[in-house]
């Protein structure tokens, strides 16, 4: 893909934001689908 001329292009902030969003989605999906410990198991960190 070729970016538009008005596009700011790649920035380090975009990379970090994308990684943070992916990590948050993974953590939420894992927390919601893990039946072994329930919602707040003995090893939960609050």
Image (spheres, rainbow, N blue to C red):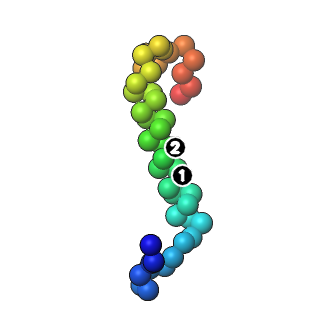
Of all residues, the one furthest to the front in this rendering is 1
* Percent x, y of residue 37: 48, 14
* Percent x, y of residue 2: 45, 77
Looking at the image, which residue is at 45% across and 78% down?
Answer: 3
Q: Secondary structure at mark 2?
A: helix
Looking at the image, which residue is at 39% across and 27% down?
Answer: 32
**Residue, disc 2:** 23
Q: Quick check: 24 above or below 38?
A: below
Disc 2 crowd rating (10 Å Cα; few below 14, some 14-19, many 20+) is few
Q: CA distance from mark 2 to mark 1?
A: 6 Å
Looking at the image, which residue is at 49% across and 35% down?
Answer: 27
**Snapshot quadrant of residue 28:** top left
Q: Quick check: 44 above or below 13?
A: above
Tell me how many marks there are.
2
Q: Quick check: 14 above or below 28?
A: below
Q: Secondary structure at mark 1?
A: helix
* Percent x, y of residue 12: 60, 66
* Percent x, y of residue 23: 51, 43
Decide: marks 2, 1 in contact (CB < 8 A)? yes
**Snapshot quadrant of residue 10:** bottom right
Disc 1 crowd rating (10 Å Cα; few below 14, some 14-19, many 20+) is few
**Residue, disc 1:** 19
């Amino acid at each position: 893909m070729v970016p538009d001329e008005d596009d700011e292009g790649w920035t380090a902030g975009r990379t970090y934001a994308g990684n943070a969003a992916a990590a948050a989605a993974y953590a939420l999906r894992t927390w919601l689908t893990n039946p072994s410990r329930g919602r707040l198991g003995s090893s939960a960190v609050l």
